[in-house]
Image (cartoon, rainbow, N blue to C red):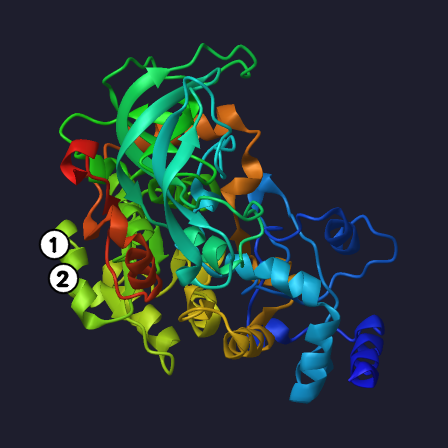
């Protein structure tokens, strides 16, 4: 095996980059999603001496290439030639083993989502307590789901008496009424999400509930930060960097928003993460505007339905993809003006043809190409979207559900992930100027410090006045592991939420 790995490395170092890779199978990696460690960043930096741009991959999120317009080109290319990709399976596994650390760091990208990839979609997070707080005379107890060991959803245990400290500066104590599930929750429990804190920790990225206490104001927030004027008794939506799988949380007030009038708590728990994901993908990166044709993958899911709503609000025409015909009804119920033949039930064998036909329908016969693709599926379906992306088009990646583990990760699970990883599609970034289109990837968890900018994005999302989120499944708090497993299956539609009963209801 070492000899095989050495031969693969030797081929890569010779720079034998196949310049026809775009015409064969096109792909690009995510926007530096997994380059968190300084060693990995330095190894793939464009500023590294004698670094030659070469083929990069999209499914696992090592780097991102080809951001168009005034966003410039953000790229970090990993050397890999066509000959190495076509080498024997043993050769591929050897190369994979030699870069195991990089491979593991990229596994968290497979969601999204959902989503998505999910804390990816939260805005300007400050860490919430992820393990029991030290008790004090004014501390309270809280029920929470704690992960003591990653690798399986069964690793979560219900803790009846976690301690929660009083709210600190700039924090609000929220009595949780509903929790929203995201794919990053699944990956953090499985140990595939790089931003996960050390065990033990409490998962969960968003919730909705009632303010029961407020800490003193926080004076060190940057100018322009939106901090809602909260009072005890207000119903609020909030995001936390972990810790939401609990009956009470201390949430930074700038990461909360008042629940819109007429919305339920479960709708509030379904809004922030997936709504901001779709908005950032389509408006901030995709620059979707009136008259555009937009391919929205997993359109019956939480992010997908928000994506369709944003297209409708700005006057863009949507092509929707779903995994089964039964999910068409969810889309048509929420968007009755959408033509049914613009909704594609994905078929691996002819997906490119399906996209072309649906785009022609959605555009009223004007064009069979798409201007923007919003993709959290990837895998075998990347090529069909990329081949039908118009000149100047933008392909926005925020997850890779086609590569998502089907269950808990044992040895067989890791082997399946490795096999999908080495078979992921490729694109040659040197060809991007010639085809005049771009691939973008994002993970908002890397933007924690951009509090003002992300607050502006949320204001833009709220200004669209979208319909309240669609709730697909509801579970009780004591059913949370079952809820996560159901969500992981990919068979749900809309948002999956967990309802937290009042303390008096539990007695």
Q: Nearer the viewer, residue 253 or 245?
A: 245
Image-quadrant location for residue 352: bottom left
Query: Is 303 situated above or below 161?
Result: below
The residue lying at 29 percent from left, 51 percent from top is 302
57 vs 186, left or right, is right
Total marks in image: 2
Tell me residue 467's x, y (percent).
19, 39
Query: Is 43 situated above or below 132?
Result: below
Q: Secondary structure at mark 2?
A: helix
- Residue 308 visible? The answer is yes
Quadrant (top left, top right, bottom left, bottom right) of the N terminus: bottom right
The residue lying at 44 percent from left, 62 percent from top is 389
Q: Are marks 1 and 2 in contact (CB under 8 Å)?
A: yes
Tell me residue 332's x, y (percent).
14, 57
Q: Nearer the viewer, residue 386 or 1?
A: 1
Image-quadrant location for residue 40: bottom right
Q: Which mark is residue 401?
A: none
440 vs 21, left or right, is left
Q: Which mark is residue 329?
A: 2
Q: Secondary structure at mark 1?
A: helix
Tell me residue 318's x, y (percent).
28, 55
Q: Which residue is disc 1 drawn over?
A: 333
């Amino acid at each position: 095996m070492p000899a095989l790995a050495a031969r693969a490395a030797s081929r890569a170092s010779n720079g034998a980059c196949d310049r026809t890779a775009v015409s064969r199978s096109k792909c690009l990696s995510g926007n530096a999603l997994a380059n968190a460690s300084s060693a990995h960043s330095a190894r793939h930096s464009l500023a590294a001496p004698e670094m030659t741009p070469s083929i990069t991959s999209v499914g696992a999120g090592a780097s991102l290439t080809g951001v168009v317009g005034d966003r410039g080109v953000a790229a970090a290319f990993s050397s890999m030639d066509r000959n190495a990709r076509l080498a024997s399976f043993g050769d591929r596994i050897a190369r994979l083993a030699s870069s195991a650390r990089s491979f593991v760091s990229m596994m968290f990208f497979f969601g999204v989502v959902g989503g998505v990839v999910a804390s990816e979609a939260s805005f300007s997070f400050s860490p919430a307590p992820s393990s029991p707080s030290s008790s004090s005379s004014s501390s309270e107890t809280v029920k929470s789901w704690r992960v003591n060991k990653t690798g399986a959803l069964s690793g979560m245990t219900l803790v009846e008496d976690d301690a929660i400290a009083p709210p600190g500066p700039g924090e609000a104590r929220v009595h949780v009424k509903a929790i929203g599930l995201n794919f990053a929750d699944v990956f953090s429990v499985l140990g595939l999400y790089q931003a996960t804190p050390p065990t033990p920790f409490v998962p969960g990225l968003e919730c909705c509930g009632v303010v029961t206490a407020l800490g003193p104001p926080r004076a060190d927030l940057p100018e322009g930060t939106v901090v809602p004027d909260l009072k005890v008794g207000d119903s609020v939506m909030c995001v936390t960097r972990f810790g939401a799988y609990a009956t009470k949380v201390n949430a930074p007030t700038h990461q909360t928003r008042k629940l819109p009038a007429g919305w339920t708590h479960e709708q509030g728990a379904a809004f922030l993460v997936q709504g901001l994901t779709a908005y950032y993908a389509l408006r901030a990166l995709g620059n979707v505007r009136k008259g555009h044709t937009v391919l929205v993958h997993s359109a019956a899911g939480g992010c997908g339905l928000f994506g369709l709503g944003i297209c409708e609000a700005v006057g863009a025409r949507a092509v929707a993809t779903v995994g089964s015909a039964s999910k068409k009804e969810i889309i048509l119920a929420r968007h009755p003006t959408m033509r049914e033949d613009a909704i594609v039930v994905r078929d691996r064998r002819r997906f490119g043809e399906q996209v072309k036909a649906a785009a022609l329908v959605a555009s009223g016969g004007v064009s069979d190409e798409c201007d923007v693709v919003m993709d959290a599926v990837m895998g075998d379906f990347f090529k069909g979207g990329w081949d039908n992306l118009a000149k100047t088009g933008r392909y926005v990646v925020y997850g890779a559900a086609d590569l998502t583990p089907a269950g808990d990760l044992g040895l067989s699970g890791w082997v399946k992930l490795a096999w999908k990883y080495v078979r992921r599609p490729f694109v040659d970034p040197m060809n991007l100027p010639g085809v005049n289109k771009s691939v973008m990837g994002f993970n908002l968890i890397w933007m924690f410090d951009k509090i003002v900018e992300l607050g502006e994005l949320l204001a833009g999302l709220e200004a669209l006045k979208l319909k309240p989120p669609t709730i697909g499944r509801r579970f009780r708090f004591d059913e949370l592991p079952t809820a996560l497993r159901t969500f992981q299956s990919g068979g749900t539609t809309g948002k999956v939420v967990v309802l937290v009963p009042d303390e008096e209801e539990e007695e």
